Image (tube, rainbow, N blue to C red):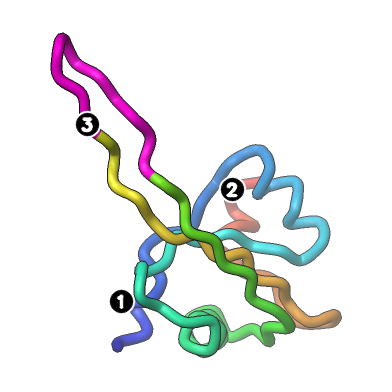
Amino acid sequence: MNKFDVIIKPLVTEKSMAEMENNKYTFQVAKNATKPEIKSAVEEIFNVKVEKVTTMNVRGKKKRQGATFGFTPSWKKAIVKLKEGSNTIEFFDSIQ
């Protein structure tokens, strides 16, 4: 799997912005991506050193329109903790 196929997009929420102080960054990743694949993709794309990767599967929410209902797609979230003394991810620095 290509490193750009592993990382889909960064997640920018209030909670993820608060975690940046602890060198933790949040990304939406491919559903079949493993922790080693996520680690190597983040290290190659952003030129940083990763200490730990935590992943979770996020279930789709139930949505309703009129009498019919369905679910939003489920997806996978990864929280990446950078090593102490590592560079920061520049994309997130421009958002603050």
- Occupied quadrant, residue 31: bottom left
Q: Earlier in the sequence, mark 3 or mark 1?
A: 1
Q: Quadrant of residue 26?
A: bottom right
Q: Secondary structure at mark 2?
A: loop
- Residue at 42% of width from left, 67% of height from top? 29
Picture residue at 30% right of the left edge, 87% below the top: 2
Question: Which residue is at a point 68% across and 42% down the rendered structure image?
Answer: 15
Q: Quadrant of the N terminus?
A: bottom left
Badge 2 local density, few (<14 within 10 Å), some, or many (20+)? Answer: few
Q: Which residues are magenta?
A: 60-70
Amino acid type, mark 1: Asp
Q: Position of residue 5 (x, y in %)?
A: 30, 76
Q: CA distance from mark 3 to mark 1?
A: 27 Å
Residue, x 22% and y 31% (percent of image)? 70
**Which is closer to the viewer, label 2 or label 1?**
1
Q: Quadrant of residue 48?
A: bottom right
Which residue occupies the foreground of this view, 70 or 53?
A: 70
Seen as rendered, the residue at the extreme top is: 66
Q: Is residue 51 left or right of residue 95?
A: right
Res 5 label? 1
24 left or right, relative to 35? right
Q: CA distance from mark 3 to mark 2?
A: 34 Å
- Label 3–label 2 contact, CB within 8 A: no
Residue tagged 2: 95
Q: Does the magenta stretch mainly form a helix, a strand or a loop?
A: strand
